[in-house]
Amino acid sequence: MDPLFVAVEGIDGSGTTTCSKLLVQALHDLKMPAMWTKEPSEGTIGRHIRKILKGQEAADELGMFPLFLADRHDHIASIIRPNIEQGTSIICDRYAWSTWVYQQDNYDPFLIEYVQRYCLAPDILFVFLCPVEECMRRLGEREHIERYEIEEKQRLYDERYRRIPKLGDERVVFIDTHKNGPEAVVGKMLAEMGL
């Protein structure tokens, strides 16, 4: 099988991190080269963004979109594209659609779409759907709440995820992560990947 670029999206607490990591493990179990990555990335810009999200550094909300975009282009150039070219599938926990969903608080969605058209489109986009109440319960189990993890905002973001635009030719698959546990979700993801 050729390497795939897979993006996993959903509101905070919907299971993107848990299931994307389990998907990488499942691919390794199948003896397939795969790498887990995330956005914001582990690069210089991504680490800076994470500090802002955790409240460790201050930043104006209007400055977040350019930071996310710069991090994404660095992530594509330094991690995503080189690994795919070397035959490793990339499973990315969050990608361009998080920017489209979250940054509409300050920017026109058509501007966000326009600027992101130069981003590498994944082969498959998995969008996790889970009731906001359940996601907020899950978030309550975390040590700290980040910048966007507020119920009112998450309700708005949930609505936006349900009508996301395509970045390119990616196949978009919606998965209910409330009715399906992590193992079942990963099973559905593998089936959609032809495995």
Image (cartoon, rainbow, N blue to C red):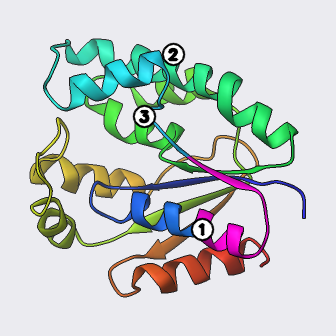
Q: Amino acid at mark 2?
A: Ala
Of pointers 3 and 1, the one earlier in the residue sequence? 1
Answer with left or right where residue 123 lies relative to residue 85. left
Answer with left or right where residue 82 lies relative to residue 171. right
Residue underneath mark 2 = 70
Q: Which residues are magenta?
A: 24-36
Q: Nearer the viewer, residue 135 or 160?
A: 135
Of pointers 2 and 3, the one earlier in the residue sequence? 2
Q: Where residue 105 sits: x, y (%)?
A: 25, 31
Q: Nearer the viewer, mark 3 or mark 1?
A: 1
Mark 3 → mark 1, Cα distance in angstroms: 27 Å
The disc at residue 168 is none
In magenta stretch: residue 160: no
Q: Furthest residue to the right?
A: 1
Numbered disc 1: secondary structure: helix
Does residue 25 lie above or below 104 as drawn? below
The disc at residue 25 is 1
Crowding around mark 1 (Cα neighbors within 10 Å: few <14, some 14 to 19, many 20+) is some
Mark 2 → mark 3, Cα distance in angstroms: 12 Å
